[in-house]
Image (spheres, coloured by chain):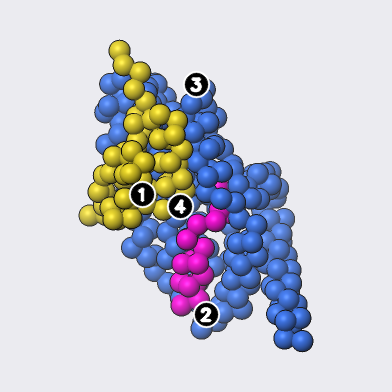
Amino acid sequence: MNNNKVAVVTGASAGIGEATVKRLIEQGYTTYAAARRLDRMTNLEKLGAILLSLDLTD
Amino acid sequence: MSSLIMPATAPTELWKTSPLTKPAASSRSMFSDLPASCSWSQPLMRQQGSGKILNVSSIGGKGWEPIGAWYHATKFAVEGFSDCLGVELKPFGIDVIVIEPGAIRIEWGQIALDTLHQASGHTAYAPQAEEKRAMFLAVAGSACDPDIVAREIIKTIRSSRPKTRYAVGFFAKPSVLMSTFMPDRFNDWMIGMITKTLLKQQRGKAGVQVA
């Protein structure tokens, strides 16, 4: 089987979420960064995060 | 191995006088967003027989303070929801972990201060709101970088047998210990004393600057 380490972080556009995405990428995780504000995650995309536009409020 | 990390439950609009206000729409982040995220991550984790769900609560998920009812209600909810989920998902090999940050330097603080003033600054609860403000400002000076929480999260998801909760950041461990082990009335007294002292200190500082 594969040894892929995958992580999804919600609220990733700022604060604790953003800091966590950076550390996960550094540790070799395939990291999905989810938030409403995609435009505020371009820095994370450059680092290698896969962006998800996620607005769970219905 | 997969992990779902959810720090998206720190609604800033919730700092206001409890008896006079309704919950803000953002309280949905706890009662709808967080359960929804937990649901969609489960099928894959069940299928692979492993996974970790980390919900970021706060030291406010254990303690309490004036003006914070709506905020603390959501944080207590994160704790209760996660604990129930944890025992439900254990048989499937999925760990549910609660992270309880203390004071962390994020944009949250300033937004909370603004809404606090707007909602409560001109009500019968204004003096309490002012004490709360003094506390926010005092804590802001000692708040930790969010990277401290990020590193704790990495350690947790790499652990083969993680604990159920981790308190991390400025004042997190003593605060959680106090809320858990000290009598309720002691904690009531303590929070009152801390906020009054901080307000006095800040007034003192302001006085010095004027002089």
Q: Secondary structure at mark 4?
A: helix
Residues at discs 2 and 1 both on one chain: no
Query: How busy is the neighbourhood of tag 2: few (under 14 within 10 Å), some, or many (20 plus)?
Result: some
Which residue is denoted by mark 4 in the rendering?
Answer: A15
Disc 1 marks which amino acid?
A: Asn
Which residue is denoted by mark 1 in the rendering?
Answer: A43
C-alpha gap between disc 4 and disc 2: 27 Å
C-alpha gap between disc 2 and disc 3: 48 Å
Q: Which chain is yellow?
A: A
Q: Are marks 2 and 1 in contact (CB under 8 Å)?
A: no
- Judged left or right of residue A38, residue B122 is right
Disc 3 marks which amino acid?
A: Ser
Residue A10 pos. (x, y %): 35, 45
Q: Secondary structure at mark 1?
A: helix
* Disc 4 chain ID: A
Residue depicted at x 55% and y 47%: B101
* Disc 1 chain ID: A
* Disc 3 chain ID: B
Residues at discs 3 and 1 both on one chain: no
- Report the mark closest to the observer, 4 or 3: 4
Q: Nearer the viewer, residue B196 or B135?
A: B135
Q: Secondary structure at mark 2?
A: loop
Which residue is denoted by mark 3 in the rendering?
Answer: B160
Chain B representation colour: blue
Q: Nearer the viewer, residue A30 or B100?
A: A30
Q: Is residue B59 above or below residue B82?
A: below
* Disc 2 chain ID: B
The answer to which image quadrant residue A51 occupies is top left
Q: Nearer the viewer, residue B105 or B175?
A: B105
